[in-house]
Image: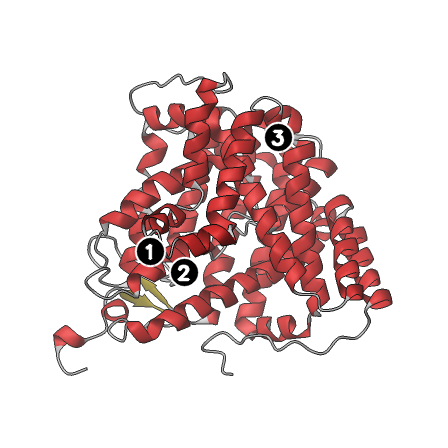
């Protein structure tokens, strides 16, 4: 690089502190309006999907649920502008059905459920921190048999479908059957349909529809719901000041008490399962970046697993103290990551640098959506639809990825049987059953070569 104009954009913009880079929006990153527009629509619908869970199972009002989502979203965006990770952050979504199934079935009161979420968040933060400092994460993943990885994903899929079609059916599906089923069907077709993927080669406009991910299904429910009498809008004008203090009083361990030691032991299997899922997200994100990097030599991306582990540990520790809803502090929102990287690779004319595109998608870190009363009240009757879409698409993705891992009939049978155990039983019993299925039905497998993240050395 010869002149100042040719210097790498991303790594020269920002304030370095330790292994991290702080990038202040509008100073170190510039807004990109296509990403801003998509983020306003998609992030609004997806980010508020937790509100019906908070209202139905954790004793919160609608306003307190909004305040909790505000705190969770703020911690997610910190991954971009405080720590400088080159990924689109989001929930560790495949683990969400397993966590909800465990917490809702085992603990009766909202206080105990939030304490369990605190134990999960803090335990996960400690595990990720230790594995990041010691660089033991890739070695752990290399040891894990492929059939057990498939078992975890299939268990997540079954738990997601059970949550939507059995556990939550009286609360959501039976109240809005047409809206929810239509939304889920549209989302599955848009996101996963092989015929539609082939058709976009002849119909370029389909690429823009597919790039919207879950939004078309959500809009379909928003239009059809009122026509069939399942959705009634009551839009209110003005501003909402989310009651953060009231929300903290109901969920922070400083207010409701700290989890007992026995609770930390109970959640340990779920913590291990979540790390395995999270590591797979890192491998996926790194592969997408490596594939696109040759097209952008002007904007080299520094992939640092140690930084990513420490950033994730810090965010989960903070969440355990102020917004304990595990596992909403993950490193990758895969759909958004792929969409932003695809436009980034088109060159500086499309996107100045990757970090600007990512931060733009998250509305430059400004959570304005949580203060707009018309938007929030307009979305309120569709929050059950948003939750169902999130869980069903997650379950489908986990299912097809998990079923693609086993190579023999014994491995497939073991993965399904172990997955059923994970979706139905307490974590310790389920983990023991899954390991027993693998050991008795499959036995020793050829060691899988885990893709070493860049920076670890291959």
Foreground: 111 or 208? 208
N-term mark: 3 or 1: 3
- Label 2 crowd bin: few (<14), some (14–19), many (20+), radius 10 Å: many
The residue beneath circle 2 is: 87
Which image quarter: residue 74?
top left
Which residue is drawn at the image coordinates 33% and 31% (left, top)? 371
Instruction: Select label 3 or label 1 by which is in front.
Output: 1
Image quarter in which the N terminus is found: bottom left
Foreground: 291 or 12? 291
Residue 358 marker: 1
Foreground: 429 or 398? 398
Foreground: 448 or 18? 448
Which residue is drawn at the image coordinates 68% and 36% (left, top)? 104
The residue beneath circle 3 is: 57
* Residue 274: x %, y % from top left: 62, 56
Q: Is residue 101 left or right of residue 413?
A: left
The answer to whether one can see residue 381 in this image is: yes
């Amino acid at each position: 690089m010869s002149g100042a104009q040719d210097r790498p954009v991303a790594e020269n913009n920002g304030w370095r502190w330790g292994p991290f880079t702080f990038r202040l929006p509008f100073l170190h990153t510039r807004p990109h309006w296509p990403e801003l527009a998509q983020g306003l629509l998609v992030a609004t619908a997806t980010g508020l999907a937790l509100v019906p869970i908070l209202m139905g199972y954790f004793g919160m009002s609608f306003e307190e649920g909004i305040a909790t989502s505000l705190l969770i979203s703020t911690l997610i965006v910190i991954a971009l502008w405080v720590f400088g990770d080159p990924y689109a952050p989001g929930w560790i979504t495949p683990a969400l059905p397993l966590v909800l199934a465990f917490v809702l079935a085992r603990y009766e009161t909202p206080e105990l459920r939030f304490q369990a979420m605190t134990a999960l968040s803090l335990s996960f933060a400690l595990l990720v921190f230790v594995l990041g400092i010691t660089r033991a994460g890739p070695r752990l993943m290399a040891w894990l048999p492929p059939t057990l990885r498939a078992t975890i994903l299939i268990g997540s899929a079954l738990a997601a479908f059970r949550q939507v079609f059995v556990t939550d059916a009286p609360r959501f599906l039976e109240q809005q059957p047409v809206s929810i089923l239509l939304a889920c069907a549209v989302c599955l077709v848009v996101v996963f349909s092989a015929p539609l993927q082939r058709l976009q080669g002849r119909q370029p406009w389909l690429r823009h529809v597919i790039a919207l991910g879950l939004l078309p299904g959500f809009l379909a429910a928003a239009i059809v719901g009122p026509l069939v009498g399942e959705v009634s809008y009551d839009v209110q004008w003005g501003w909402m000041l989310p009651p953060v203090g009231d929300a903290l009083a109901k969920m922070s361990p400083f207010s409701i008490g700290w989890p007992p030691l026995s609770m930390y032991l109970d959640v340990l299997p779920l913590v291990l399962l979540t790390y395995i899922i999270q590591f797979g997200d890192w491998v996926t994100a790194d592969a997408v970046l490596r594939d696109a990097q040759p097209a952008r030599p002007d904007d080299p991306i520094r992939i640092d697993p140690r930084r990513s582990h420490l950033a994730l540990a810090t965010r989960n520790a903070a969440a355990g103290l102020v917004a304990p809803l595990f596992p909403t502090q993950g490193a990758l929102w895969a759909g958004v990551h792929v969409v932003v990287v695809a436009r980034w690779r088109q060159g500086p004319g499309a996107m100045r640098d990757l970090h600007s595109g990512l931060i733009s998608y998250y509305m430059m870190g400004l959570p304005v959506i949580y203060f707009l009363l018309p938007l929030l009240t307009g979305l309120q009757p569709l929050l059950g639809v948003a939750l169902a879409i999130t869980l069903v698409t997650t379950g489908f993705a986990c299912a097809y990825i998990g079923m693609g891992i086993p190579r023999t009939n014994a491995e497939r049978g073991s993965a399904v049987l172990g997955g059923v155990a994970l979706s139905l039983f307490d974590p310790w019993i389920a983990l023991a059953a899954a390991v027993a299925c693998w050991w008795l039905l499959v036995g020793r497998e050829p060691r899988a070569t885990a893709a070493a993240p860049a920076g670890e050395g291959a």
